[in-house]
Amino acid sequence: MAQFVQALALGVLIGGIYALMASGLTLIFGVLRIVNIAQGAFLILVATFTWWLWRATGLDPILASVITAPLMFGLGWVLYRFVISRIRGQAASMSVLLTFGLALVIEGVLNIVTGNRFRSATPAYFEESFRLGDILLPKAQVYGFLAAVAVLGGLYLVLTRTWTGRAIRATSQNPSAAALVGIGATATAALAFALGSASAGVGGSILSVLYPFFPASHYDWISRLLGIVVLGGMGSLPGALCGALILGLAETLTATYGSLQWSTLVFYLVIMVVLLVRPQGLFGARLREDAA
Amino acid sequence: MNFLRRIPRQHLIAGIVLLLLVLYPVVNPWQPYPQGVMLIAFLLAIQASSWNIISGYAGYISLGHSMFLGLGSYTAAIIALHTGVNPLWVAPLGGVTAVVIAIVFGSVVLRTRGHAFVIITIALLLSAQIVATNWDGLTNGSDGITLELPFWSADFQNIPFYYAFLILLVLTVLFSAWIARTKFGTGLIAIREDEGKAASIGVNTTVFKILAYAASSFFIGAAGGVYAYYQTFLNPVGAFAILGSVLIVLSALLGGRGSLYGPVIGAFIVSLVNEAATVYGGSTQSRVLILGLILVAVVLFLPAGLLPTLQAAWRKRHPVETKYTDQTGALSHQTVAVVRERLPDAPVTPGPLLEVRGVSKRFGGLVAVDNADLTVERGSITALIGPNGSGKTTLFNLITGNMPVDSGTITFNGKRIEKLAPWTRGHLGLGRTFQVTRLFKDMTVLQNVVAPLPDGRLRTMFADAVSGHEAARARDLLGVVGLARFADQRAGELSYGQQKLVELAQVLMLSPELILLDEPAGGVNPSLLGRLTGVIRELNQAGVTFLVVEHNIPLVLDLCDPVHVFARGSCIASGPPQQIREDPVVLDAYLGDDWRPQDAHA
């Protein structure tokens, strides 16, 4: 029993962190209709940078997100304004290919600059745990979870309580109507892409402590994150939360009762089953397409 | 040499290049290095050309296509290991494995539109790697499988592999060319351009996409079997490398996605660049960066790809004159025969053809269609009028299946259809046009008209779309609407009114018993409108029933009988036009107080 509760607790912690990582992807898709294949590469880029910062200055990797998030916000904004916005109005598949290309460029640069080997940031609390009765909660996981929840909460507040957030949501629902009431489409899109990238900033810093990574790890990550988004329903933030929790639980439960190697497969299996029953994903809405 | 001139120039060039490639090992036999580079280029070309079927023709991008190469390799290697058969002879079974996997996963993911597919393709590739690594008993895990060396004398070097890959490449290109010629291929392009519209003209989009995915996997899987033997060793990381997928995508994109030879040309270029990067650029590290930069550059600056861009430039310099072939003869007596071809010969018997009973549709809090009833009599031209937002177009979408009903029944020709897929309703004889025309703008006018499928049979699906009966019929139908001379023009280049007529011809290809016209007169100039109403009357004479949504009231009162008036999601009045134009309820809800009956003829 304790083993089960332990697995559940770990699953929720990891799920929260996955939710943060997937939120950027789903935000970018919701507003821009772009599947950002480079989101995984963003995570690895940030993780590598965080690792370097931690080695050079001893700055706590999770705290480093205070630096990495704004940096990624800037990078996302620049990438959107100068690269991605150039293909607006073209077929959606072009954005997939473009962001795939960007992911490769980031991977290639990391390969050349940092070399092709595994890394992991190991601060002092790396191997310590909090004890709750029979349950052990690794400190790194807990700190990461708290940071993720704080950032997700902040993101939620920005989207619902500020003019900027309303502009982003308006654009995601109807870009041309939003433009008619004075919301600049390009500026809002750039902002959404920057916000999505910034969430990868925090996510990547957390990742550097929790998982060993190397430049080509981004394929694993993007595949997991995309799985979460498909499972939850493309573009739905609550869907991403739910999908992330399912992935977290599937992984920890499979690792506890089966073996770690198969945990990712179990998650993909869950996706397949969900898609069989609900092709649009758990929270995916089918909106009317006639009133364009 | 006269017959050579009649072969299109691109096929002629391809033939000459093929001849040179066939002769190359004979002319220059003792050069293992260039042969090795070439056969890897053939392998990449096989993959890019196959990828083009699902991602170029149908527009569904796969980022994990190298998985099929790995599946084929493992299939052939495992069979060879357990039975002792030479992997070369069981290589086609690699293709079979690839097809089975494509169909199984395609049927799960391809039922929806949009992005789930691209995502699953990456996930599948990584999953395949995980399975190959962990299923020790079958695959030998990460140690991999070692195969015997080729059975032929070392004197032949890799020449047998060279020819094996070349033959597979020729088969792949022929297969792709054949697909592009069929109605299946036209349907795939229709899906790429506008999937909802494709479904409404009888294209079973789900089956088409799954078949396209399967078709794009077979030759890669078969080539995988040969490749395993060529390498004599395979392991999970090498067999399911994502870099392989990158090369495929890049090749097809660079050469020209959706064109026949583009992916092959792209594969040769990418292979050479890749080889050069390996020799001069150092390790894999810099290769990823170089490939990534090229991919970004191609998407940004050469999105159509080399071949289509060059072809467009060539066409600009050498414009083809529009052939003015018909004009007289349009709207001739031939109309009836052409349209009725697939209809039963029975004379039109009166009675209801379409019955809508108690149908409702909600969008969140908005009730767009509220418990609506509507009957369309066989042989009539029935009108549906009403203010904007009264639910007319939504009702159309419910009848044709573009949206599911929330409740109520729809009966067509005595058969309940409200649960059927849009294409099945099309096969039953239900056709529609759209309020804003939705032609496939990058296809020619003729391709647009050939695309519809009047039934779901495989024979129809794989019928020739470029020549033969279907194309002839499409030309006839273009003649019916008087646009045959535009047959080879791109549909997007036509005027709006002409596009409306092409859309009508497209629907006629379904040989429909009932055609739903959504605002046929909107944006059409008066002279074209005259032609349009003429065609509608003529077709009606031939036994086609019409349901028309239209705001042009004089036209409605002139053309249609009976007229149904819709307001707030249901029918508030029905009757012959004379009665409707004086009905106080209708005047209040739609026409307004200042409508005077005599305006009808103004």
Image (tube, coloured by chain):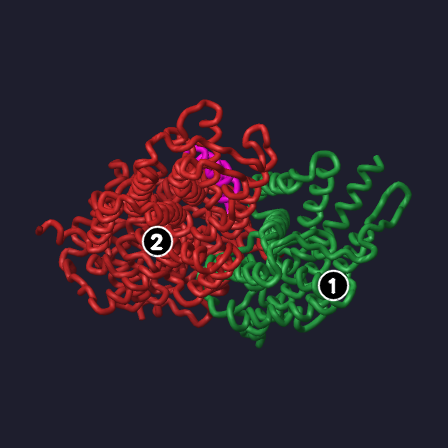
Looking at the image, which residue sits at the far top? B83
Q: Provide residue B284's location: percent of width, then percent of height.
A: 51, 54
Label 2 resides on the chain identified as: B
| Label 1 crowd (10 A; few <14 / some 14-19 / many >=20) | some
Q: Provide residue B276's location: percent of width, then percent of height.
A: 41, 57
Residue A55's disc is 1
- Camera-near label (2 vs 1) is 1
**Mark 2 → mark 1, Cα distance in angstroms:** 45 Å
Secondary structure at numbered mark 1: helix
Task: Give the colour chain A carries in the figure.
Answer: green
In the rendered image of this protein, does residue A198 appear above or below residue B537? below
Q: Provide residue B427's location: percent of width, then percent of height.
A: 36, 41
Q: Provide residue B93's location: percent of width, then percent of height.
A: 41, 31
Give me the chain that's red.
Answer: B
Q: Amino acid at mark 2?
A: Phe
Q: Which residues are magenta?
A: B96-113
Number of on-image labels: 2
Residue B102's disc is none
Q: Residue at x 46, y 70 (%)?
A: B593
Residue at the disc numbered 2: B268
| Residue B408 visible in the shown view | no
Circles 2 and 1 on the same chain: no
Q: Residue at x 71, y 48 (%)?
A: A245
Q: Quadrant of the C terminus of chain B?
A: bottom left
Secondary structure at numbered mark 2: helix
| Residue B537 visible in the shown view | yes
